[in-house]
Image (cartoon, grey):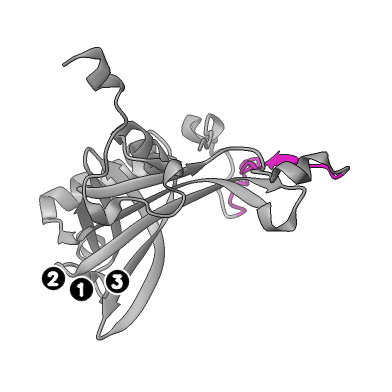
Amino acid sequence: MTTADTNKPAEPPTERTRLKRYHWLAKYDQETINAIIDAGIVCQIGYVIDSQPYVTPTNHWRIDDYVYWHGSSASRMLKEQQRGIPVCFTVTHLDGIVFSRAAFNHNINFRSVMAFGHGELCDEELKREALQVFVDRLAPGLWDYARKPTDQEWKASKVIRMKLDEVSAKVSDGLPDEEPEDLASNLWAGSIGLQLVQAPPVPDPKLRPGIDMPDFVKNFKYSR
């Protein structure tokens, strides 16, 4: 592979994932896509049941080139998705507000991923492995610390996964895109970055006396 090949921008995996509008914001490389997915805890899953569209927010996590989500075994959403119906997976991070000199050009800075695919039910062994990864993703060491699920709790849970074959990212991190004539105005323009602020831990008031806060809570740091 030549240097020119390695510097060539990644191409969309399919035409369905090719960005048509604002195509210059598109990112198709695996590193960018994985980073956006991994930085989020909440995703949105779009699907259709009996001609009715739904978009369900849920927790997600990624293992290699699969994205996972879970829920109740009684969930209608999961029952339909395990049949392999088409689904659309999205994650979005709001990073800032962009103020323009012209009202038409106000904008936001963001990172987002959209993936198309079909849900696949994880078997019992894979479900247990995947849920442990999910729990430790929230806070490393949490799985070993907490009480393990009972047989009934395992039965009450399902895990769906989807392979990241058709996926693209969209990233906006710039300043206002101004018309030349607006640059001559006396109006202010710029941006304000936004961050999710982490609050201090709040102990459960029902804790028995003498129970110390575990290290994974003391050292917890959410980063996106």
Marks 2 and 3, how far apart in space?
12 Å
Identify the magenta region: 187-205
Q: Earlier in the sequence, mark 1 or mark 3?
A: 3
Q: Which mark is residue 47?
A: 3
Image location (x, y in percent) of residue 147: 34, 48
Q: Residues within 10 Å of mark 3 (few under 14, many from 20)?
A: many
To which residue does mark 2 refer? Answer: 83
Marks 1 and 3, how far apart in space?
12 Å
The answer to whether marks 1 and 3 mark residues whose Cβ atoms lie closer than 8 Å is no
The residue drawn where x is 14% and y is 67% is 84
Q: Secondary structure at mark 1?
A: helix
The residue drawn where x is 19% and y is 65% is 155
Residue situated in front as seen by the camera: 119 or 100: 100
Image location (x, y in percent) of residue 50: 25, 86
Q: Residues within 10 Å of mark 2 (few under 14, many from 20)?
A: few
Residue 219 vs 116, above or below: the answer is above
The residue drawn where x is 15% and y is 59% is 120
What residue occupies the far right of the structure in this picture? 186
Q: Quick one: quadrant of the N terminus?
A: top left
> Closer to the observer: label 2 or label 1?
2
Marks 2 and 1, how far apart in space?
7 Å
Asked whether residue 209 is drawn in magenta, I would say no
Instruction: Name which residue type carries label 1.
Output: Lys
Left/right placement of residue 143 relative to residue 24 reads: left
The residue drawn where x is 39% and y is 70% is 55
To which residue does mark 1 refer? Answer: 79
